[in-house]
């Protein structure tokens, strides 16, 4: 079952507008979600809308607050998201960071009091499409203990980096500090999967598991053992502590409507012209990406640089439509009924 990105974005915008969000803000949030769907990352896509709106109805998340800069120091700033949608806060922060990078060579915007912001790569792609290097980090709710620890404290805490390219698809690295994002396990569970790949998670006792239900009740595995755990910790310090939002381990997870999230972000834009020069940077990037992508593959297939697979997936989705499961359509249909709208066609 497929739907077009245009149709899905219009539907998500209509839902948020019907809930009371200003339409231009609703379109920004919908664009981030559907952008994830176009990449096949449905764990961060439009079907998450119901969870966000459940948090709004529970009073632990603001639908459409006024987000304001509370600190402004030339190349740097702090944005107070006022407990609103992370997608809107991070989008605004990156637009601001890009403007500062144009003026100062670098723009760094920290975001306080935010919520889950979806797919990190969306924001760095915006910078890279503007010819700038983009970096985005966020903290998340506890999903694993520190390496050799016994208490769940560290989040999946992703980092994304986008590199502009004039003649090839952008290089975009978007990765969590765990082996896999928890949303992928939750999506597998929601869609009736009885098994996930080994190495993704442990159960509540700390034993490795391939059962998605046991994995959700247990801990995720850090990416590369102590390296992933260390990466998660420093990302949390940069996203949560630098913004003054909260200490490591304090973020409340998206499905938990008992308290505000307390999520922090950090977005950075760098203008190559302010460093070695934009033209030289572009030549070196083109040469480097060509050296990777044109290399003979060890398995006889193909060598990819970060972002190339996602670029091709997006092209397919824009051409052939976004493929959704029956569970996805049921969730979108429930949202349509909730707000008196027509659901996307199956």
Image (cartoon, rainbow, N blue to C red):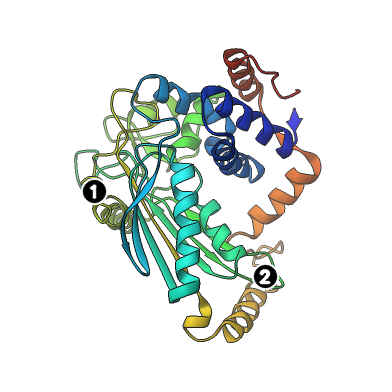
Q: Which mark is residue 146?
A: 1
On screen, residue 7 above or below 293 = above
User: Which residue sits at x=26%, y=55%?
Assistant: 237
Would you identify the image quadrant in which residue 1 lies?
A: top right
User: Which residue sits at x=59%, y=25%?
Assistant: 15
Q: Earlier in the sequence, mark 1 or mark 2?
A: 1
Left or right, 21 with respect to 60, comes to right
Nearest the eye: 240 or 70: 70
Left or right, 230 with respect to 41, comes to left
Q: Position of residue 260 (x, y in %)?
A: 30, 31
Q: Position of residue 14 (x, y in %)?
A: 63, 28
Label 1 to label 2: alpha-carbon separation: 36 Å
Instruction: Answer yes or no: is residue 28 visible.
Output: yes
Element under disc 1: loop
On screen, residue 43 above or below 328 = below
Circle 1: is it few (<14), some (14-19), or many (20+) Cα within 10 Å? many
Instruction: Answer yes or no: is residue 117 visible.
Output: no
Q: Quadrant of the C terminus?
A: top right
Residue highlighted by disc 2: 293
User: Which residue sits at x=64%, y=67%?
Assistant: 298
Element under disc 2: helix
Would you identify the image quadrant in which residue 282 lies?
A: bottom right
């Amino acid at each position: 079952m497929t739907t077009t990105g245009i149709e899905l974005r219009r539907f998500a915008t209509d839902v948020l507008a019907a809930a009371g969000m200003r339409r231009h803000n609703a379109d920004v949030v919908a664009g981030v979600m559907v952008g994830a769907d176009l990449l096949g990352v449905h764990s961060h896509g439009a079907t998450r809308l119901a969870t966000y709106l459940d948090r709004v109805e529970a009073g632990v998340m603001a639908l459409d607050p006024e987000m304001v800069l509370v600190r402004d120091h030339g190349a740097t700033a702090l944005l107070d998201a006022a407990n609103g949608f992370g997608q809107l806060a991070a989008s605004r922060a990156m637009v601001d960071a890009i403007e500062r990078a144009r003026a100062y060579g670098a723009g760094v915007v920290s975001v306080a009091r935010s919520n889950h912001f979806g797919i990190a790569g969306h924001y760095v792609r915006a910078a890279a499409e503007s010819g700038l290097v983009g970096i985005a980090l966020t903290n998340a709710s506890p999903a694993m203990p520190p390496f050799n620890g016994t208490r769940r404290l560290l989040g999946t805490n992703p980092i994304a980096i986008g590199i502009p390219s004039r003649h090839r698809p952008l290089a975009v690295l978007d990765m969590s500090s765990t082996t896999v994002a928890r949303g992928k396990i939750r999506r597998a569970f929601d869609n009736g999967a009885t098994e996930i790949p080994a190495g993704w998670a442990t159960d509540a006792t700390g034993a490795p598991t391939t059962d998605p239900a046991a994995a959700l009740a247990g801990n995720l595995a850090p990416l590369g053992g102590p390296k992933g755990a260390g990466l998660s910790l420093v990302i949390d310090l940069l996203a949560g502590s630098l913004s003054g939002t909260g200490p490591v381990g304090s973020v409340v997870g998206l499905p938990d409507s008992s308290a505000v999230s307390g999520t922090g972000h950090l977005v950075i834009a760098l203008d190559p012209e302010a460093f070695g020069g934009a033209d030289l940077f572009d030549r070196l990037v083109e040469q480097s990406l060509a050296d990777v992508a044109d290399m003979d593959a060890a398995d006889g297939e193909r060598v990819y640089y970060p972002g190339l697979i996602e670029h091709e997936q997006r092209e397919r989705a824009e051409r052939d439509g976004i493929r959704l499961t029956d569970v996805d359509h049921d969730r979108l249909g429930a949202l349509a009924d909730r707000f008196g709208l027509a659901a996307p066609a199956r």
